[in-house]
Amino acid sequence: MGNPAAEKNTFAAFLNAAPAFAGDKITNWSQPKQDPPDVLCTTEAGLQVGLELTGWLDNGQITDAKAIEAIEQSIRKALRPEPPNHTEHIHYAWLRTLPRARIKPTDEGAGGTGKRNGSGRSAAAGRISAVTRRWRNTCSR
């Protein structure tokens, strides 16, 4: 959050609503000078729990994030099972989506059981292989 006064008020309200959120009663808490964490708690058992507070600015952001999450989930389902990554330079690929884009359940790869038998997965793997080959030819020199 970045505002110590707001963090203090937010955590105090949270602690009031859930005093045993850490699985034990919180006996002491403070805001360390070194951030993170925003809040450092001690439980009755003597365990320390550090918290970094974040927040949504408005409900519209939550709605937008959930919509994007649903789109990403439909893409991940279509690419399952994920093939092993044997590339040297590419650790993951981030797929960008169009607004309201969805992959129909009948088009999902779902381990090759969908109508398209994982063609999205094959296309993604083929594209990554092509980039890897090009990388070896141009960047390894």
Image (tube, grey):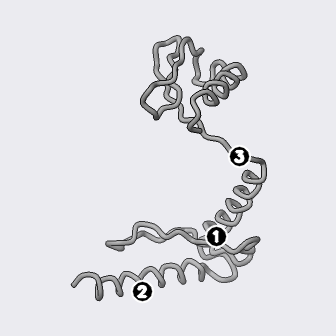
Q: CA distance from mark 2 to mark 1?
A: 21 Å
Give the structural element (helix, strand or loop) at label 1: helix
Q: What amino acid is at disc 2? A: Ala
Horizontal and vertical percent position of residue 23: 58, 22
* Distance between the alpha carbons at the discs numbered 2 and 3: 41 Å
**Quarter containing the N terminus:** top right
Residue 87: x percent and y percent? 36, 74
96 up-or-down from 62: above or below: below
Q: Earlier in the sequence, mark 2 or mark 3?
A: 3
Q: Amino acid at mark 1?
A: Ile
The mark lying in front, picked from 2 and 3, is: 3
Which residue lies under the disc numbered 2?
A: 130
Q: Are marks 2 and 3 in contact (CB under 8 Å)?
A: no
Determine the secondary structure under disc 2. Answer: helix
Q: Residue at x 78, y 53 (%)?
A: 60
Q: Are marks 2 and 1 in contact (CB under 8 Å)?
A: no
Q: Residue at 66% of width from left, 28% of height from top?
A: 10
* Residue that mark 3 sits on: 57
Of the image marks 2 and 1, the number of the one nearer the N terminus: 1
Residue 27: image quadrant is top right
Disc on the earlier residue, 1 or 3: 3
How many numbered marks, from 0 up? 3
- Tell me: 36 left or right of 140: right
What amino acid does circle 3 point to? Leu
Q: Is residue 135 visible?
A: yes
What residue is shown with label 1?
Answer: 75
**Circle 3 Cα neighbour tier, 10 Å, few/some/many (<14 / 14–19 / ≥20):** few
